[in-house]
Amino acid sequence: MQTTTVKNILTAGLVLFIIACNSTDKKVKTPDKTADTAVADIPTTPAENPADVTTVPASKCFSNDGLKYSVVIKLFYSSTTQLTGTVVSKHLESGESEIAKFTGTIVGDQLTTQFRGNPPTVGDASEWTSKPWTIDNKPGKEKIRIVFNAKNYETNKWAETDYEFAATTCQ
């Protein structure tokens, strides 16, 4: 008699378990993957895709430490052809900084930029030009070349001079 009672209890428990699993198991149909894999899967859990977070464009930073100024350029890519950015120029002796914002377009390896207001000082005898900036994308050695109008202290003459800004970690 005890074995019949134990069998009945186990059977009833198993039936309840199966019913409970079937009633709470809500199957979610996902679309079949097709040959069109260009669209990325969108995370569905709140932790992976919080509703209040906006997408931040990719950014890159470049720096050049001159004789009197340390200059950091930060680029924010808003698309493959558009960007915005900042240039922070810090006087090495006084520690005072100037910050200037700019917008720009990208065509190939050329950046055409325009400052909002006056560009920052990068040297006592260096002036910004309107010439495009050039990006050199060699792996591990990425840099930006910017043409400045700079005074040569040996000849005491002004000439267009390339300044190189090496890729650095954004902070």
Image: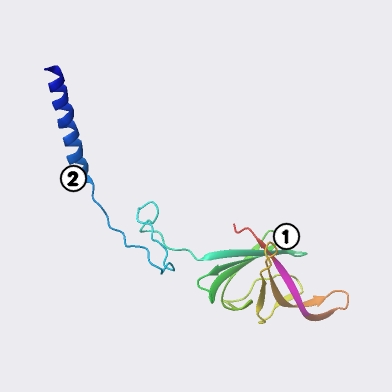
Q: Nearer the viewer, mark 1 or mark 2?
A: 2
Which residue occupies 16% across, 25% down?
Answer: 7
Residue 162 forms part of the magenta stretch: yes
As rendered, which of 150 and 16 lies closer to the eye?
16
Which residue occupies 72% across, 60% down?
Answer: 92
Query: In the drawing, does residue 161 fall left or right of residue 28?
Result: right
Q: Residues within 10 Å of mark 2 (few under 14, many from 20)?
A: few
Question: What is the three-letter code of the residue carrying label 2?
Answer: Ser
Q: Secondary structure at mark 1?
A: loop
- Image coords of residue 122 (percent x, y): 70, 70
- Residue 44 image-quadrant placement: bottom left
- Residue 6 image-quadrant placement: top left
Q: Secondary structure at mark 2?
A: helix
Residue 70 appears in the figure? no
Q: Quadrant of the N terminus?
A: top left
| Residue farthest along the top direction in this orientation | 1
- Which comes before the other along the chain, label 1 or label 2? 2
- Image coords of residue 125 (percent x, y): 77, 74
Residue 92 marker: 1
* C-alpha distance separating marks 1 and 2: 70 Å
Residue 31 forms part of the magenta stretch: no
Above or below: residue 117 compared with residue 12: below
- Image coords of residue 106 (percent x, y): 58, 77
| Residue farthest along the right direction in this orientation | 154
Point out the stretch of residues depicted in magenta.
160-165
Above or below: residue 61 compared with residue 28: below
Which residue occupies 40% across, 59% down?
Answer: 53
